[in-house]
Image (cartoon, rainbow, N blue to C red):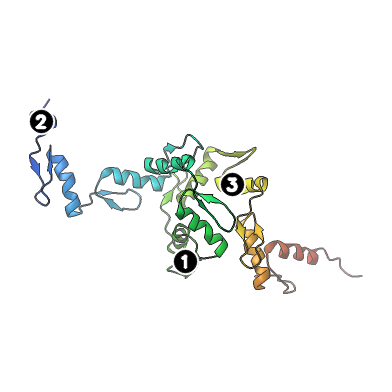
């Protein structure tokens, strides 16, 4: 055991802190704690992410950041099995199981544990999309979706599969892709699904939940895509055009059905 180690150990018990920061006067038991603290003042960032190069003051912060690239989610909720990157995210999530839901949507009555979740939900009814892409101006109802969209312009793909090297824009895409290698199908409703979203959407068929409401006529839908197609009845938009005859349709399914009438026509005579 070294002399310096013994001295440090003794200071812990005596409370002696002889290493003092010249900037703010805060004192520490050993020099390594002082050095770590001084980076706050100098903003020295010596720990760099191996995937994107982003630098951090503390190694723990760098380690936690790298999990966003690898898709590593070691913190799992015992109630529902949801996996989180950080322990504080898990703690925050677990409160959603026990917290009383106080915030109710006036349009459909759905309740939420946080006012921010309610505000996000209400945009489904109002159609409000306040978050704009700085590249193309496309509008989104929440900032996360907007940020993910902007990466399609920059081509930024930080999330890399360790098995095959394929890269993705979103960590959720990497997580879904990795199940191709593992064969994992964690989300079940009798029927099994690779994606949580696919299971969640499927469950609405059983529950009858229709959260997507047309602001023009109040008609409600199970899926956002169905609402999008329906809204074209009000706007008159018909983006799907038959190459054979030029007839236009509001959704691709109608176009495909129509195109069969051309291929099924029997030659005259």
Where does label 1 land, which residue?
Answer: 130
Position in image of residue 18 (x %, y %): 7, 39
Circle nearer the viewer, 2 or 3: 2
Q: Earlier in the sequence, mark 2 or mark 1?
A: 2
Is residue 10 left or right of 237 when viewed as pictured? left
Query: Which structural element holds mark 1?
Result: loop
Q: Is residue 92 visible?
A: yes
Give the CA separation, mark 2 to mark 1.
57 Å
Image height of 168 relative to 127, above or below: above
> Mark 3 = which residue?
200
Asked if 239 appears above or below 210 in the picture, the reply is below
For residue 136, side relative to residue 186 (left or right): left
**Secondary structure beneath disc 2?**
helix
The first of marks 3 and 1 along the sequence is 1
Q: Classify residue 20 as left or right of residue 67.
A: left
Real-space Cα distance between discs 3 and 1?
26 Å
Q: Quadrant of the C terminus?
A: bottom right
The residue at which mark 2 appears reads as 14
Label 3: element kind: helix
């Amino acid at each position: 055991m070294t002399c310096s180690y013994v001295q440090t150990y003794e200071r812990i018990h005596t409370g002696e802190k002889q290493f003092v920061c010249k900037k703010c006067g805060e004192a520490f038991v050993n020099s390594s704690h002082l050095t770590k603290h001084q980076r706050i003042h100098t903003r020295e960032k010596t720990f760099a992410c191996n995937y994107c190069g982003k630098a951090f003051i503390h190694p723990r912060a760098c380690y936690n950041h790298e999990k966003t690239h690898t898709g590593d989610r070691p913190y799992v909720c015992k109630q529902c099995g949801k996996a989180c990157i950080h322990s504080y995210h898990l703690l925050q999530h677990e409160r959603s199981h026990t917290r009383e839901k106080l915030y109710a949507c006036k349009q459909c009555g759905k309740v939420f544990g946080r006012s921010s979740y309610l505000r996000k939900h209400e945009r489904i009814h109002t159609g409000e999309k306040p978050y704009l892409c700085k590249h193309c101006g496309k509008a989104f109802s929440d900032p996360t979706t907007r940020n993910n969209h902007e990466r399609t312009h920059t081509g930024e793909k930080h999330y890399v599969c360790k098995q095959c090297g394929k890269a993705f824009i979103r960590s959720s895409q990497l997580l879904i892709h990795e199940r191709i290698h593992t064969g994992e199908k964690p989300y079940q409703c009798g029927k099994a699904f690779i994606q949580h979203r696919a299971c969640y959407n499927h469950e609405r068929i059983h529950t009858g939940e229709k959260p997507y409401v047309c602001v023009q006529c109040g008609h409600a839908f199970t899926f956002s895509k169905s609402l999008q197609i329906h809204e074209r009845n009000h706007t008159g938009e018909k983006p799907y055009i038959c190459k054979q005859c030029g007839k236009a349709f509001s959704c691709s399914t109608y176009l495909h059905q129509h195109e069969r009438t051309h291929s099924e026509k029997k030659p005259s005579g």
